[in-house]
Image (cartoon, rainbow, N blue to C red):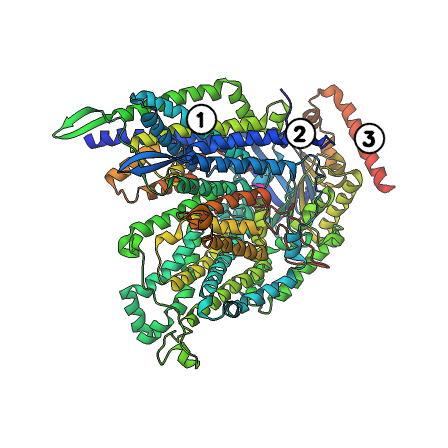
């Protein structure tokens, strides 16, 4: 890798020029089963990257490796705050066995060495889950407050200041509430702030999960099928939400998605997985036209590919006209 | 060496009893995912039923053949203990099925306290000794006066355990009841949709577990010659330890675990300290659960994200 | 084979003629009676008695008939009333009366309860016509408050963090033995007496040991919590039970250190912040110009445990509104989601264990000073079960529910001691106190069947934007750890 590459260098795509996350030769084995097989790809800073593939391709496993819930069998997961590390820096942090090299302007984290809570707390990678995991018995506001746990814990003097009502804690609590209010506004849940999360309709629960993840100030947001179970209108709102998250907060987004209208509409970069290996990687346009992708999705031979392409085009057209009307 | 062999024999005998009780824990845990806290007390109740039946058979009916008497006692104790456990499931657990997870556990603890005190109130708080039943021994080795013996009652315990286990193994492996049990274990709703009577299957599981506990109760009474209302808790915990050590949900595991716990307890008492033998059992329980929660023959559980 | 779902609905109620209802109810009651006959025949129909050193049988057909009769009549009456097919099923939705008591009228009830608790010794003395006569009631109040405090302490672990702890009595024991050992062991006494001055140590021992008992118990909570971090649900419950039993067995067997089964006696009594409750010149009575009365000490103990319990409640309420308390509840709701938000669940669990254990340690220290005697007998599994039952009956997480449950259960158990008049009905050798645990066990089962979620099943949010709405128990999870 070239030292401190400039984003526009040599017409490289953003994910090559300025990657926030580099997945390198990732393997994940469960007993004899190889769920992820020598997977490498990069996620560009400020990009919306989609990870797609047929059911059982290993997408969620990759997510679980990135977010620390699984320990990869092999491979390196490099997350960069600030600018991407040079090859020497990377080699050094890898060799000395540290899980991170934290600098003033930029830091590098080796996610495969970190337990899950550090991946989210220190490396600032937040995630949502395929089967929504909210704190259903807590209110919407409480869910968003829990997400700011680490900040508030310090502000409450690890409970001591808070227990005796010392100053500082109240201000921190107010600031946290303001942030929660901002995100409730953003996902349209202000009216339901005091309702239990378990009471919300499905679509609202998905939005709340995203808001909760954002409350932990991530630099990379990983969404596991955010549009699953949403109706077309809700999908559209989701697209807008994700775009604004990126535009206003500079958060990079990595998402798993089956809904092609979402994938093709908003992503800058698509990575396609099948049987744990990467079969395609590029812009949505390039991936869409990749015959291997079509074959993997439909299990068809080359003859049927054109037909499928036409179908996908039609679907996207239908969605985008729906969006503009 | 001779001490070792003697302890080995004693350990296997005790282990057989634990194994029989452990099956009740493991089956109930397998099918409804609950630790039946009252199972140790069901075992205790069975030893009292056996005691009363034994007294009836020998004093009132005047049967002198000890083997005939034991056979009658075994059958009667199995029947009444099964009825008891069936009623317990019906009253204390079935209404709570599918409810709050803690509820059946609290209910089981309550049932355990109830059973122990019920026996205390109805039969009195004192130890109830029975006259020694089968006293003959086989001298295996005689080493300068230290005799390694195998008592006939130990032979009976091991043989009865082995025969019952084989019969029981056949029942759960080869019959439709066993199939129904395994189906309910996997997916209760689906099993119901496929025409399995779930309530019935669960009830039968409790009945079988109690029957085996009753066998253990009879053997315990014969071996130690005493019944006491508080003798349910500690053997219950040890049998549960056996079930966990063998891998909860696994039937051969329960027996293997039972034998191991029996051996560990006996050797610990013989070579280390008899005061701390229960501490040893509890420690094994904790260590197994912490470091090897799937046990020796159980399936490992993978955390789903 | 008929398709039968696990949760089969009762047969639809149709307007059937009452004669068939009667017949059906009767038939059902007969079957139940027969089952009861089968259940009771061995253990109630016969009694094993020891005559001249040999075991014999006694027959009790009368008792058996009465028991079976009770079951038969009871079932018949229930069939005709509560379970009658003609009875309209009561449609109940929304919070129960207890839930409302816990949340809406709670704010009004709490000060009243508090005022009652503060005034209780005076009310008792007034009602019984004198301080000495009220001794029994005040002792009962102390016992109830001890269990309220233990319930609130365990509530942090079980109700808030959702970690099932069946060995809570261990921390109670650690607290009690901390004070007993520190205050009675000669070398330790000498050390403190040399360090703090003989009289000072003698007068202040309890007040110095109280925080130490909490700290020790909290440390034990962490130590025992650490190995069980990975365990969930029933396994966690069993391991904590095992730890509780191990501690008790060690207390019994380590005779040199703990005095073994005989326990530790003549533990120094509590002082009024350095002023002993003696008749002498420097005593409490003389200092305040009162006539000496041993009840002063008892009433003082009552206020000590009341203060300790209130501190527990206050700290819990505060902690719930702090990040650590929210993390406890979030842990109960979804551990994986917690970790995805950067929460170190290890620390969260340990802090819950330690906090709960600390309050148990305070209560234990108080127990030792009140009784003046500790032995392993006081720290059996039954106590753990009792505290857990109080927490679950109260409604996990609800403070007022736990307090009510403790009062009902401990008060009820105590009342069973005093049913001496039953002797006149059942004959002279009838001992009602024998039935305490029997009824307690039965009540645990009955309460679970009746109200699996406890008296107060709703949860009060810790923060709100516009209005504080109680969260229905249906959404609140019970934790899996």
What residue is pinned by disc 2?
A54
Residue C288 position within the rendered picture, expressed as x and y whole percent measured from the top left: 44, 80
Q: Is residue C90 left or right of residue C41?
A: right
Q: Is residue C64 magenta?
A: no
Q: Is residue A66 magenta?
A: yes
Q: Chain of mark 2?
A: A
**Residue pushed farthest right?**
A325
Residue at image mark 3: A314
Q: Which residues are magenta?
A: A65-69
The percent coordinates of residue A181 (x first, y second) are 71, 57
Q: Nearer the viewer, residue C240 or C252?
A: C252
Q: Is residue B213 left or right of residue C79?
A: left
Q: Are marks 2 and 1 in contact (CB under 8 Å)?
A: no
Q: CA distance from mark 2 to mark 3?
A: 20 Å
Question: Which one is in front in this view, the residue at disc 2 or the one at disc 3?
Answer: 2
Q: Mark 1 sits on what residue?
A: B79
Judged by its main secondary structure, the magenta piece is loop
Q: Quadrant of the N terminus of chain A?
A: top right
- Choose mark 2 or mark 1, whichever is in front: 1
Alpha-carbon span between mark 3 and mark 1: 72 Å
Q: How many angstroms separate mark 2 from mark 1 (CA)?
A: 56 Å
Identify the image quadrant of residue C105: bottom right
Q: Secondary structure at mark 1?
A: helix
Q: Residues within 10 Å of mark 3 (few under 14, many from 20)?
A: few
For mark 2, give the secondary structure. Answer: loop
Comes first in the chain, label 2 or label 3? 2
């Amino acid at each position: 890798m070239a030292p401190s590459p400039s984003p526009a260098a040599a017409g490289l795509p953003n994910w090559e020029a300025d990657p926030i996350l580099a997945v390198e030769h990732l393997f994940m084995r469960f007993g004899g089963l190889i769920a992820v097989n020598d997977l490498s790809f990069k996620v560009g800073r400020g990009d919306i990257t989609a990870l797609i593939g047929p059911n059982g391709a290993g997408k969620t496993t990759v997510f679980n490796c990135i977010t620390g819930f699984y320990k990869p069998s092999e491979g390196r997961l490099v997350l960069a705050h600030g600018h991407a590390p040079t090859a020497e820096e990377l080699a050094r942090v890898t060799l000395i066995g540290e899980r991170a090299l934290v600098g003033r302007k930029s830091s590098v984290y080796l996610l495969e060495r970190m337990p899950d809570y550090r991946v989210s707390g220190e490396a600032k990678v937040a995630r949502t889950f395929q089967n929504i995991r909210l704190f259903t018995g807590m209110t919407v506001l409480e869910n968003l407050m829990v997400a700011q746990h680490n900040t508030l814990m310090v502000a409450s003097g690890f409970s001591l200041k808070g227990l005796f009502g010392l100053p500082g804690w109240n201000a921190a609590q107010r600031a946290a509430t303001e942030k929660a209010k901002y995100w409730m506004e953003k996902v349209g849940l202000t009216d339901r702030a005091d309702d239990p999360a378990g009471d919300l309709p499905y679509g609202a629960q998905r939005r709340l999960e995203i808001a909760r993840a954002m409350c932990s100030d991530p630099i990379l947001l990983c969404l596991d099928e955010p549009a699953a179970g949403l109706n077309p209108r809700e999908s559209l709102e989701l697209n807008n939400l994700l775009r604004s998250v990126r535009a206003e907060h500079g958060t990079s987004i990595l998402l798993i998605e089956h809904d092609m209208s979402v994938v093709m509409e908003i992503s800058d970069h698509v990575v396609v997985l099948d049987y744990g290996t990467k079969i395609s990687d590029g812009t949505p346009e390039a991936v869409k036209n990749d015959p291997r992708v079509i074959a993997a999705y439909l299990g068809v031979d080359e003859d049927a590919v054109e037909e499928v392409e036409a179908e996908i085009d039609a679907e996207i057209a239908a969605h985008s006209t729906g969006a503009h009307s | 060496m001779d001490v070792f062999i003697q302890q080995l024999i004693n350990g296997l005998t005790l282990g057989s009893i634990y194994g029989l009780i452990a099956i009740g824990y493991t089956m109930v845990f397998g099918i409804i995912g609950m630790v039946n806290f009252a199972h140790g007390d069901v075992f205790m109740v069975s030893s009292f039923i056996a005691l009363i039946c034994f007294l009836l058979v020998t004093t009132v009916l005047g049967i002198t053949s000890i083997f005939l008497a034991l056979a009658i006692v075994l059958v009667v104790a199995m029947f009444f203990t099964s009825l008891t456990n069936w009623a317990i499931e019906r009253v204390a657990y079935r209404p709570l099925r599918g409810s709050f997870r803690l509820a059946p556990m609290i209910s089981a603890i309550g049932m355990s306290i109830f059973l122990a005190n019920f026996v205390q109130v109805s039969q009195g708080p004192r130890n109830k000794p029975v006259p020694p039943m089968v006293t003959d021994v086989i001298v295996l080795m005689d080493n300068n006066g230290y005799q390694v013996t195998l008592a006939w009652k130990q032979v009976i315990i091991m043989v009865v355990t082995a025969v019952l286990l084989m019969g029981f193994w056949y029942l759960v492996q080869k019959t439709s009841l066993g199939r129904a049990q395994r189906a309910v274990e996997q997916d209760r709703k689906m099993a119901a949709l496929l025409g399995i009577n779930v309530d019935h299957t669960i009830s039968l599981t409790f009945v079988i577990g109690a029957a085996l506990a009753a066998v253990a109760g009879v053997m315990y009474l014969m071996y130690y010659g005493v019944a006491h209302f508080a003798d349910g808790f500690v053997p219950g915990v040890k049998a549960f330890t056996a079930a966990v050590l063998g891998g909860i949900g696994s039937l051969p595991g329960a027996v293997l675990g039972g034998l191991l716990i029996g051996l560990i307890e006996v050797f610990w008492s013989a070579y280390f300290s008899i005061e701390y033998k229960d501490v040893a059992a509890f420690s094994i329980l904790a260590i197994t659960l912490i470091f090897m929660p799937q046990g020796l023959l159980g399936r490992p559980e993978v955390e789903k994200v | 084979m008929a398709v039968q779902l696990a949760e089969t609905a009762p047969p639809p109620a149709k307007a059937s003629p009452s004669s068939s209802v009667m017949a059906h109810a009767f038939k059902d009651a007969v079957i139940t009676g027969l089952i009861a006959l089968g259940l009771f025949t061995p253990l109630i129909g016969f009694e094993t008695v020891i005559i001249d050193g040999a075991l014999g049988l006694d027959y009790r057909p009368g008792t058996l008939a009465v028991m079976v009769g009770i079951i038969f009549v009871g079932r018949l009456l229930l069939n005709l009333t509560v379970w009658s097919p003609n009875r309209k099923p009561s449609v109940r939705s929304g919070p129960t009366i207890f839930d409302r008591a816990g949340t809406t009228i709670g704010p009004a009830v709490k000060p009243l309860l508090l005022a009652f608790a503060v005034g209780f010794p005076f009310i008792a003395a007034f009602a019984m016509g004198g301080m000495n006569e009220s001794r029994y009631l005040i002792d009962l109040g102390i016992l109830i408050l001890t269990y309220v405090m233990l319930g609130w302490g365990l509530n942090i672990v079980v109700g808030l963090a959702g970690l099932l702890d069946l060995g809570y009595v261990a921390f109670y024991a650690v607290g009690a033995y901390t004070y007993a050992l520190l205050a009675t062991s000669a070398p330790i006494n000498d050390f403190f007496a040399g360090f703090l001055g003989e009289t000072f140590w003698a007068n202040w021992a309890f007040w110095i040991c109280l925080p130490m008992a909490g700290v020790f118990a909290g440390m034990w909570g962490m130590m025992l919590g650490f190995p069980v971090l990975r365990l969930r649900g029933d396994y966690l419950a069993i391991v904590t039970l095992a730890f509780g039993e191990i501690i008790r067995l060690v207390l019994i067997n380590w005779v040199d250190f703990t005095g073994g089964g005989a326990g530790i006696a003549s533990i120094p009594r509590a002082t009024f912040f350095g002023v002993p409750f003696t008749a002498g010149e420097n005593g409490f009575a003389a200092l305040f110009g009162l006539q000496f009365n041993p009840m002063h000490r008892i009433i003082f103990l009552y206020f000590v445990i009341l203060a300790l319990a209130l501190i527990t409640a206050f700290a819990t309420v505060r902690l719930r509104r702090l990040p650590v308390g929210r993390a406890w509840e979030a842990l109960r709701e979804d551990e994986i989601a917690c970790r995805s938000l950067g929460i170190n669940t290890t620390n969260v669990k340990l802090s819950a264990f330690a906090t709960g254990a600390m309050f148990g340690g305070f209560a234990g220290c108080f127990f030792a000073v009140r009784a003046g005697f500790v032995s392993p007998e006081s720290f059996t599994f039954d106590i753990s079960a009792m505290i857990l039952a109080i927490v679950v009956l109260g409604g996990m997480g609800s403070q007022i529910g736990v307090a009510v449950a403790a009062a009902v259960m401990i008060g009820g158990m105590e009342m069973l001691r005093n049913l001496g008049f039953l002797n006149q009905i059942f004959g002279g050798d009838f001992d009602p106190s024998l039935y305490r645990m029997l009824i307690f066990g039965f009540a645990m089962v009955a309460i679970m069947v009746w109200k699996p979620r406890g008296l107060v099943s709703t949860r009060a949010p810790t923060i709100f934007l516009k209005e504080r709405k109680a969260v229905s128990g249906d959404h609140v999870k019970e934790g899996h750890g």
